[in-house]
Amino acid sequence: MKDLTFSVVFYLLGMATLSFGISMLILSDLGVGAWDALFVGLFELLGLTVGSWIFIVGILLIILNSYLLREKFDFSAIITIFLIGIFIDFWVLIVFDGVILSDLVLRTALLTFGIMCMGAGIAMYLQFNYAKNPIDNLMMAVHYRTGKSLAFSKSSIEIVILIIAFIIGGPIGVGTFIIAFGIGPLVQFFYKRVSSFKTYLVQSSTH
């Protein structure tokens, strides 16, 4: 029971940290991840908010994943896209509303810090295995339907989304490519440490 409680806490902290990192990348204006470039591009092209597009696209992905995997509608995934959308809008529209940075050194620092926060945030929310991210599930769905490797499925999806984001004017830059190649190792780095820390907290709370 305590393990579940700490997993939920880390999940919520992970959502907040991940969304904060993404907001830092948006603020740096040096490029965001492919999916985030898509969401920001849709926001700038059609309106609503970045968080709203995360939710809308997420719902569409949940439906698509259900069809591709031949599984029931994953209601738990709605929790993840709802929270990440709310957190993103909180940081972008309330905390950093109207902030524009021109200093390249500061923007580079925000980019670096943002990517670190993304890695740590993902590592934290992965401690809770029940509310899956529909983007990650799409990788599994493509892998299931095509028989291709997970790496190939992931890369193919990212390339397609990157092209769409580029076409609609999403914020693609050096940060986009750093995330593409660096976020995996960064998540792995943080995941081991977060898992060890969570285990320590669980064990300490039982004494």
Image (cartoon, rainbow, N blue to C red):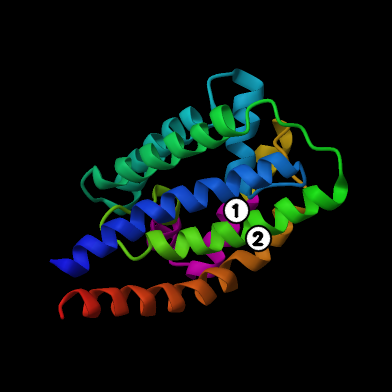
Residue 13 spot, x, y in % from top left: 40, 54
Is residue 65 shown left or right of residue 95? left
Task: Give the answer, above or below, for where 134 lies relative to 188.
Answer: above
Task: Give the answer, above or below, for where 71 lies relative to 180.
Answer: above
Q: Amino acid at mark 1?
A: Glu
Q: Nearer the viewer, mark 1 or mark 2?
A: 2
| CB within 8 Å, label 1 to label 2 | yes
Quadrant in the rendering for residue 151: bottom right
Residue at image mark 1: 158
Residue 192 spot, x, y in % from top left: 44, 79
Which residue appears at 20% of the width and 74% of the height?
A: 205
Secondary element at tag 2: helix
Residue at image mark 2: 180
Q: Is residue 84 visible?
A: yes
Q: Is residue 121 magenta-colored?
A: no
Outermost residue, left side = 1
Quadrant in the rendering for residue 28: top right
Is residue 18 shown left or right of residue 158? left
Which residue appears at 47% of the width and 60% of the height?
A: 122
Magenta span of residues: 137-159
Which residue appears at 17% of the width and 67% of the height?
A: 2
Secondary element at tag 1: helix
Q: Quadrant of the N terminus?
A: bottom left
Q: Residues within 10 Å of mark 1 (few under 14, many from 20)?
A: some
The label number, if any, that marks residue 57 in the structure image: none
Is residue 15 shown left or right of residue 128? right
